[in-house]
Image (cartoon, grey):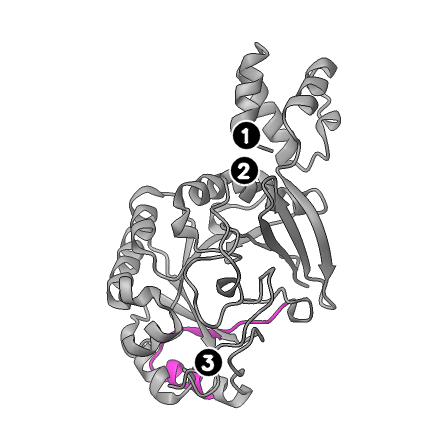
Amino acid sequence: MDLVLLEGTLADLGEPSYRALQVWEWTARGAGSYDDMTSLPKHLRTALADAVPFSTLEVVTERESRDGTLKTLFRTHDGHPVETVLMRYRDGRRSLCLSSQSGCPLTCTFCATGAMQFGRNLTASEILEQALHFRRREAVNHAVYMGMGEPFLNVDAVLASALRLRDIGITHRRTTISTVGWLPGLRRFVDEVEKPIRLALSIHAADPELRSELMPVNDRYPLDDVLAECRRYVELRRRKVFVEYVMLAGVNDGPQHARALAASLDPKAFKVNLIPYNPTGGFDASSRSAIEAFKAVLDRARIPATVRLTRGRDIEAACGQLATAPRTRRSAIRG
């Protein structure tokens, strides 16, 4: 629901200020409608149902993967598409992949979202509604801002929503914000957020020329500057930064690329997550042997590294696959 509209409506109705907290607490616990909020007077529930839509997003479609991953396509009130994913794990984790924008203007070449038309930033309420949609279905306990969009291009709404996730059941320590290195928003995050929210950085190439080919944002905010800001985060928060590295066959997956990545990272500050490429057009996935050889270089350099378990690939819900427009095949880049 639109929390700003909610507070304004309650004030107009002459209700005491604690009513907004009551409504939010019910909503965060998974209430399905105002009628479920039995601690509110019936006349107030009726008035809110008329004045404040319970959901800020319309569900268009839902698809479920063979591995239990669930992807939902929403539409905003003004017609913009948004995709969100719930990942279910055998150990009990229920992790949400949240979107911060409809589309993304940064056009990373391996990401399907960057190929679709950019819509707009999402509001904090629209981001929270993605989480609440799944919370109404089942308990959730992890969240990553790795869906559509660059979170730090929408830093106010992202931070406002992230700080409320704890009420839904997702602690700050189990919340991760991922960036390609948009420095203005990253600096604000480091300076302003004292809660133990995790930080992830998409690198995908340590060589400046190759990274700029893959991720044009590198021309504006070079990797060295971004890494310096990440190290400041580590110094202030005493938490490592996760490094995301998608493995593209013949592009960024050779031993020389691994050595360059290892040379750029302090093992005390960073942990690498190698991501098998999920088909979006334009690239081929690295072989298992190439990924293992890449990881072996990082292991020898004592850089902590893991290989991500791919979820939801069969419904185009895996990393880099979220998009709501036809994909175009990009010209190949070779490293």
Left or right relative to 86: residue 215: left
Q: Is residue 215 above or below residue 40?
A: below
Q: Quadrant of the C terminus?
A: bottom left
The disc labelled 3 sits on which kind of residue?
A: Ser
Residue 221 showing in the rendered view: no
Q: Find numbered disc 1 in the image and state the secondary structure of the residue it sits on.
A: helix
Label 2 or label 1, whichever comes before in sequence order: 1
User: Is residue 211 within the magenta segment?
Assistant: no
Q: Is residue 143 visible?
A: yes
- Which tag is nearer the camera, tag 3 or tag 2? 3
Verify CB contact (< 8 Å) between mark 2 and mark 1: yes
The residue lying at 28 percent from left, 78 percent from top is 263
Identity of the amino acid at label 2?
Ser
**Nearer mark to the viewer, of 3 and 1:** 3
Q: How many marks?
A: 3
**Cα distance between the residues tagged 3 and 1:** 44 Å
Q: Which residues are magenta?
A: 293-311
Three-letter amino acid code of the residue under disc 1: Leu
> Which residue matches tag 1?
3
Report the side of 183 relative to 250 (left or right).
left
Residue receiving disc 3: 331
Which element type, helix, strand or loop, lies under badge 3?
Answer: loop
x and y, in percent, of residue 7 in the image: 53, 22
* Residue beneath disc 2: 125
Mark 1: give few (<14), some (14-19) or many (20+) Cα within 10 Å: some
| Quadrant holding the N terminus | top right
127, above or below 143, in the image: above
Q: Residue at x 50, y 65 (%)?
A: 115
Q: Earlier in the sequence, mark 3 or mark 1?
A: 1
